[in-house]
Image (spheres, rainbow, N blue to C red):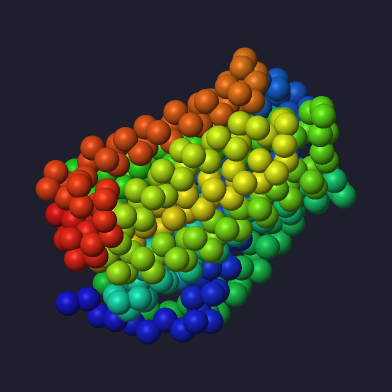
């Protein structure tokens, strides 16, 4: 029986804030790609490589660093990674040419996985009955960090240049490390006894043994590929005629997706009630539909705003539901479970980023929307075909709580 450890509201909010600050490092670059490309002499059609390299670093961090939370004291691990992230951010801010910049941005992505260590730690400290709610709360902090990252980076870039964004974040990492060092529990029991190679191998073994992990990881790959298709390429039409918006204005569009953060918390509550499959189906359907208004971006800002709200709400609802369902299995392996899951998140984000800018260069915004809609539809189809056969009709046509709860553990 898993022991419930009380988690105060203040500590939960600190987890949310720290997670948001850490994950923002991955997304600061998105509104700045044009400026970064010009400064570092990266071709416009290839500038999406900045996001792809960051996501590649993130993927490596998920595999190489995140499992360490099951082996070592998470308080010390989290603080150490935040301080190393500070160093990486300062390298990005200083880098005079592409090689050092790419090395620094890869390290930023590598160390940003501290976000997932925080989410897994919060899930461990939460009582089982409220785990979905806590995961939803912390994930809301992650969503807000992603959204505010674009607004902050756009504003700071207009005021002091894109490099100032990374100096600002380096200071933020230092302050976050100090706050967590003082607030997190000193003791972190329940560690596995294994060598580092055995720990890494167990990530793949868990992926092989746990069907729910495999299914939810592939869903994550599809939804975050769609997410990156939008947010990596959106700066391109918004900075071109007829809009020609500044970095500050482009970054402000991220705030429209706050509905996604609200949906994330609600999705965790629904997962606690056994409605995870129903929530997934509804959200994936909304994700596909979101590309209809998004396709009218160059004609109507209102259509863009509606599409952003739908897309962010859908993606974060699925993401929280995925995590809530995964955290119900193997409590002693949560860091490794989330490593396997988020590895596919990172793969999807990296593929979506480079595909989006390449598609925009050849087929414009219409091509980007077709790409995003196709990826979203594949995700929905995949969810349908991976439902247990005996429950497909029930899950798709009704909200019968008891049946769906049984499906989640099938």
- 241 relative position to 48: left or right: right
Residue 389 appearing in the image: yes
247 left or right of 169? Answer: right
Where is 335 relative to 216, above or below? below
Q: Residue at x 68, y 63 (%)?
A: 172
Between 346 and 288, the one lying in front of the other is 288
Q: Closest to the observer: 378 or 131?
A: 378
Q: Quadrant of residue 176?
A: bottom right
Q: Is residue 373 left or right of residue 402?
A: right
Q: Residue furthest left?
A: 390
Q: Is residue 340 above or below residue 22?
A: above
Task: Give the image location of residue 241, x and y in percent.
Answer: 82, 27
**Residue at image x 17%, y 77%?**
1
Pick the quarter of the image with the C terminus.
bottom left
- Which residue is located at x 41 percent, y 58 percent? 320
Residue found at the far front of this picture: 397
Coordinates of residue 277 in the picture (x, y in percent)? 29, 54
Question: In percent of the image, x 36 and y 66: which residue is there?
Answer: 270
In the displayed structure, would residue 42 be above or below residue 119? above
Q: Is residue 65 visible?
A: no
Front residue (pair 24, 371): 371
Indicate the position of residue 180 as horizontal and vertical percent values. 54, 73
The residue sitting at the top extreme is 362
């Amino acid at each position: 029986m898993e022991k419930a450890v009380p988690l105060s509201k203040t500590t939960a909010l600190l987890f949310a804030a720290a997670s948001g600050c850490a994950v923002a490092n991955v997304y600061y670059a998105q509104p700045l790609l044009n400026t970064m490309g010009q400064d570092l002499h990266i071709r416009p059609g290839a500038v999406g490589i900045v996001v792809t390299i960051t996501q590649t670093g993130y993927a490596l961090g998920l595999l190489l660093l995140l499992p360490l939370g099951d082996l070592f004291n998470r308080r010390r691990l989290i603080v150490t990674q935040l301080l190393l992230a500070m160093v990486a951010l300062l390298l990005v801010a200083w880098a005079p040419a592409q090689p050092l910049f790419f090395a620094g941005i890869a390290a930023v992505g590598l160390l940003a996985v501290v976000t997932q260590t925080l989410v897994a730690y919060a899930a461990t400290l939460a009582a089982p009955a409220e785990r979905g709610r806590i995961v939803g709360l912390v994930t809301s902090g992650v969503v807000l960090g992603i959204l505010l990252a674009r607004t902050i980076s756009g504003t700071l870039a207009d005021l002091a240049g894109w490099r100032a964004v990374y100096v600002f974040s380096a200071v933020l990492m230092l302050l976050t490390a100090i706050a967590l060092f003082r607030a997190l529990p000193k003791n972190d029991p329940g560690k596995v006894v294994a060598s580092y190679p055995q720990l890494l191998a167990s990530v793949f073994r868990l992926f092989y043994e746990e069907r729910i992990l495999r299914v939810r990881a592939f869903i994550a790959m599809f939804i975050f590929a769609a997410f990156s298709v939008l947010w990596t390429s959106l700066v391109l039409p918004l900075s071109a005629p007829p809009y020609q918006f500044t970095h500050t204005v482009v970054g402000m569009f991220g705030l429209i997706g706050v509905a996604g953060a609200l949906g994330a918390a609600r999705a965790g509550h629904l997962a606690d009630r056994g409605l995870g499959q129903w929530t997934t189906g509804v959200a994936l359907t909304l994700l596909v539909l979101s590309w209809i208004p998004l396709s009218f971006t160059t004609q109507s800002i209102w259509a863009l705003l509606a599409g952003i709200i739908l897309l962010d709400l859908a993606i974060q609802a699925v993401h929280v539901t995925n995590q809530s369902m995964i955290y119900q299995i193997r409590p002693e392996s949560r860091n490794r479970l989330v490593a396997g899951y988020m590895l596919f998140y990172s793969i999807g984000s990296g593929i979506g980023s480079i595909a989006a800018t390449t598609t925009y260069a050849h087929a414009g915004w219409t091509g980007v929307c077709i790409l995003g809609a196709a990826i979203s539809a594949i995700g929905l189809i995949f969810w349908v075909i991976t439902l247990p056969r005996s429950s497909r009709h029930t899950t798709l046509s009704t909200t019968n709580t008891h049946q769906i709860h049984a499906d989640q553990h099938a």
